[in-house]
Amino acid sequence: MSTGGAFGGNRGARPVPPEKGVFPLDHMHLCDLEKKEYISCLKTSGHKSEICRHLSKKYLECRMEKNLMARQDMSELGFGKEDISEVTKEKNEDGRIKS
């Protein structure tokens, strides 16, 4: 007879909470535009996330503004000052930042 749980897990093991905690899903679609921009960028770049990093940051900032996740310094989420300089390099001829 098996001593594991319904899905093969150990019944005696204590669950470990996620590192960053739980945050609500975006049921009201408050950050859909940012999410769609990021996913579109991933598709066009061959799923190279480093190319779309500025959009990932934009999405996380939207989630924090809309209280869909706890406000944190972007450096704690893996974004530093070099990320800002990368975005400013991607300017059009007229000086506007491409997104």
Image (spheres, rainbow, N blue to C red):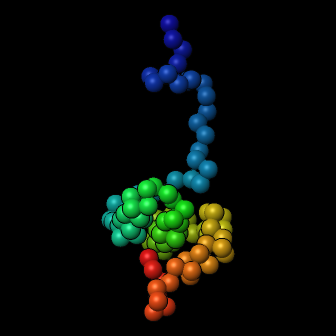
Rendering coords of residue 46 (x, y %): 43, 56
- 75 sits to left or right of 95: right
At horizontal 49% and vertical 22% (from top left) the residue drawn is 8
Q: Quadrant of residue 26?
A: bottom left
39 or 30, which lies in front? Answer: 39
- 81 sits to left or right of 69: right
53 or 58, which lies in front? Answer: 53
The relative height of residue 73 versus residue 12 in the rendered view (above or below) is: below
Residue furthest bottom as drawn: 94
Q: Quadrant of residue 88?
A: bottom right
Q: Is residue 31 visible?
A: no
46 or 85, which lies in front? Answer: 46
Q: How many marks?
A: 0
The relative height of residue 37 versus residue 97 in the rendered view (above or below) is: above
At horizontal 51% and vertical 65% (from top left) the residue drawn is 51
Residue furthest left as drawn: 28
Residue furthest front as drawn: 93
Rendering coords of residue 7 (x, y %): 45, 24
At horizontal 38% and vertical 68% (from top left) the residue drawn is 37
At horizontal 54% and vertical 14% (from top left) the residue drawn is 3
Rendering coords of residue 16 (x, y %): 61, 40
27 or 96, which lies in front? Answer: 96
Q: Quadrant of the C terminus?
A: bottom left
Q: Is residue 95 visible?
A: yes
Rendering coords of residue 35 (x, y %): 40, 64
